[in-house]
Amino acid sequence: MTQPGTRRTGAARPTLADVAREAGVSTALVSIVMRGVPGASDATRTRVRAIADDMGYVRDERARKLRQSSSRLIGVTFDLQQAFHGDLVEHLYGAASARGYDLAISAVAPSRREDVAIQALLRERCEVAVLLGSALADDELATTADRVPLLLVARRSEVAGVSSVHSDDAGGVGLAVDHLVALGHRRLVHVDGGDAPGADDRRRGFALAVERHGLGADARVVAGGPTEHDGSRAAEGLLDSPTSPTGVVAFNDRCAAGVLDLLVRRRVDVPAEVSVIGYDDSRLAVGPHAQMSTISQNAAEMAEAAIDGALDLLDGGAPREVVLAPHLVARSTTGPASGAGLLG
């Protein structure tokens, strides 16, 4: 680290990133200190300013004025294949517009990695990035947060400096189990989400709920994933199981749609023989062929909280976690238990 009282000479003018490296903090935190906005402790402000002075850092007024001509853009990445993400984007547009901002959208797809989608947003001079269902590792999120204020949606944040907005996934799956138990179901299966964001919490919520109802011996978790193919594959395995369930809690609506498709093709009566419940209450849950019971994350409420959280970060607010309460939406894919299960 530069010794106190010494200044760099004959070198390029120090930048915020240089100060951040010297101080061992994020560029975003140095920016907060230099702008004099809330979000840093007094001790941190004193230390960062001292390091900046020692390095000869001078605020670039031209850059500051350029930033003040603010793009008023909020960058959003979303998974092109996830219906719930599409619902969120629709509501994010309205929430951002109501606050005088617009969105720059960058899609994640099988042929386009999430880091590529984020780089596209940075090139658009977005002031803050909102990542829907991000699959990035924590170190990648930390690196991104050094470049732009960052908020995760539909995923908890384990990274210092990164905000998050998500539903109580464990509690939501608990609501699904409660619903099926109230209908008389005892043999329950959770088709999980594999390594998808939120899958761990939903597995945990299922385990806690079945134990609470004393059904641990009759309930199990089977490997699934976030897509229709994952749900269909899991349902095929259930058909071949000697102890079939009467109630299925799927990781999300897409997974549930795959379960339902396989059951219909195998002429299993839903919900007379087996009940199926999804998670998200996405547009997939209300279609021409199925009115799916599901757990709603309330896309509109989540979008409002995400935009508020993103703009709070821009104002220098401390990163925070917002946890929203999901609720049950009972439709036609769940009904009273027959006791027969898939195999009759």
Image (tube, rainbow, N blue to C red):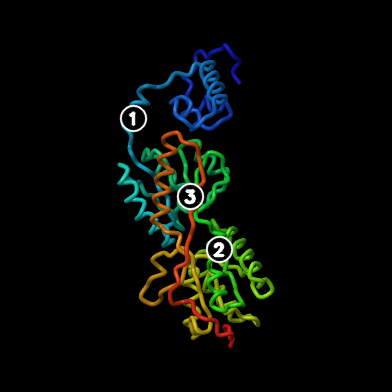
> Furthest residue to the right?
217
Q: Secondary structure at mark 3?
A: strand
The N terminus lies in quadrant:
top right
Q: What residue sits 58% from the left and 81% below the top? A: 239
Foreground residue, 237 or 189? 189
> Furthest residue to the bottom?
344
Q: Residue tagged by mark 1?
A: 68
Q: Which mark is residue 193?
A: 2
Q: Which mark is residue 165?
A: 3
Marks 3/2: CA–CA distance: 19 Å
Which kind of residue does numbered mark 3 sit on?
Answer: Val
Q: Secondary structure at mark 2?
A: loop
Marks 1/2: CA–CA distance: 43 Å
Q: Secondary structure at mark 1?
A: helix
Residue 223's x, y, as percent? 60, 68
Q: Is the residue marked by circle 3 packed among few (<14), some (14-19), or many (20+) residues within 10 Å? A: many
Q: What residue sits 49% from the left and 13% below the top? A: 10
Residue 78's x, y, as percent? 43, 53
| Sequence-earlier tag: 1 or 3 | 1
Marks 1/3: CA–CA distance: 27 Å
Compared with 84, 243 (above or below) is below
Residue 226's x, y, as percent? 51, 64
| Sequence-earlier tag: 1 or 2 | 1
| Sequence-earlier tag: 3 or 2 | 3
